[in-house]
Amino acid sequence: MSHVIDDTRPIFVQIAERIENDIIAGELAEEAQVPSTNQFASFYQINPATAAKGVNLLVDQGILYKKRGLGMYVAPGARTRLLEKRREQFYEQYVVTMIREAEKLGITQEQMADMIQRGVKV
Amino acid sequence: MSKVVEVRRLTKSYGSVIAVNQVSFSIEAGKIYGLLGRNGAGKTTIMQIITAQLFPTSGDVKAFGEAPYENIRVLSQICFVKDSQKYPNGYRVLDVLHQAAFFFPHWDREYAFALIKDFRLPLNRRMKALSRGMLSTVGIIVGLASRAPLTIFDEPYLGLDAVARGIFYDRLLEDYTEHPRTVILSTHLIDEVSRLLEHILVIDQGRLMLDEEADALRGRAFAVVGPAATVDTYTVGKEVLDRELLGGLVSATVMGNGNASDRQQAEALGLELAPVSLQQLIVHLTSGKYERKAVKVR
């Protein structure tokens, strides 16, 4: 995933996705502290209110939680829940799209299975 | 949230020319606003009225809850940085800083001198001998170091190169984070500043076209590309901002968030969807090809 913010989607959503990615990759462990809103704002050169909105989105979903006076932390079980969510998205985003494109190009299901085998070995 | 500026049905005309036409909006405390629009759209006129440098033809303007005219309580809280700023004869950069220290109650002298270093500005040079870019830099430094509760930057970067503009955006964001205040940034360099903005006002031909949270506008429109007839079938009943021909293909910019049903309908027709950036959206809204009903007066 790119580290550049793009201007075609809400920035707060992109900030939330970055934090999710870091949790999934294990870079942000459960009970680890998340960078502050101001750190996000200065790193990505975005409005602090927008960064706060992204962080709060994950607080609302129970992925992050607030320790009063200390900052935001990754909630226990956050990674497992994010993985479940992303696996569902994987089907929609990649599998469905792949099948459509394969149909367009006349690739059979067997050929597709072969390609997946080949891809796994790389 | 408290309102720093309230503009109601503001109109300014010069003879038969209507520069600002029934514009209403409010500015909330502690946010960075973008006042966007093409040259001559009426942005500067609106800011001049808010800062009591022009009288409105009709309508009502309040800043910090009061009428701004000859009102020192209001005007001492506003810093208006504009590219046409005039300085007294013989003034040096240093004199401008002294004057600003006298006028702005929240002036931060140390910060001003730190900015002079950042921008590599010669302190003792006469204002008359400064290059266009250096003049702009003086305005930017005054605007930042004034720490005014309402700071307005009207196209503040004439003659500034990309590096200096970058320093400006960095410092603005940094200082705003440490000292939250209300900022209005009037510009047509939308791509450069859009990430800094929390709220966007778009003015076109004297009218208010948009008054919305910046992030809510991202992903608000999308483009569909395909054969002309198919695209036209798809866009029936949709709000089309722009329609462009590319050989036998048409690219139409459509209002909507490109959600699952938009996507499925487009795919069923064999059309491709592409995202539209905030800058592209605003360009389409103000290109004059598209007549959108101006935001209703509340």
Image (cartoon, rainbow, N blue to C red):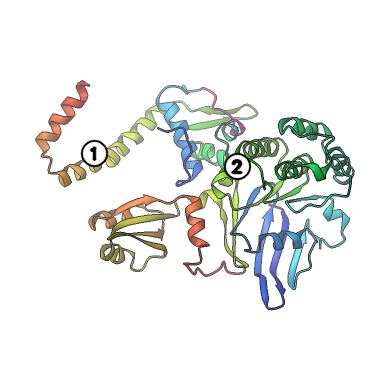
Give the mark nearer the N terminus: 1 vs 2: 2
Name the residue rendered at 30%, 36% in the picture.
A90
- Where is the N terminus of chain A found, in terms of image quarters? top left
In magenta, the rendered stretch is: A32-39
Residue topped by disc 1: A95
* Pointer 1 local density, CA inside 10 Å: few below 14, some 14–19, many at least 20: few
**Mark 2: secondary structure:** helix
Labels 1 and 2 positioned on one and the same chain: yes
Name the residue rendered at 86%, 40% in the picture.
B92
Q: Amino acid at mark 1?
A: Val
Q: Chain of mark 1?
A: A
- Give whichever of B1, B6 is nearer the camera: B6
Residue topped by disc 2: A49
**Mark 1: secondary structure:** helix
Q: Is residue B266 magenta?
A: no
Q: Residue B49 appears in which quarter of the rendering?
A: bottom right
Name the residue rendered at 49%, 69% in the picture.
B291
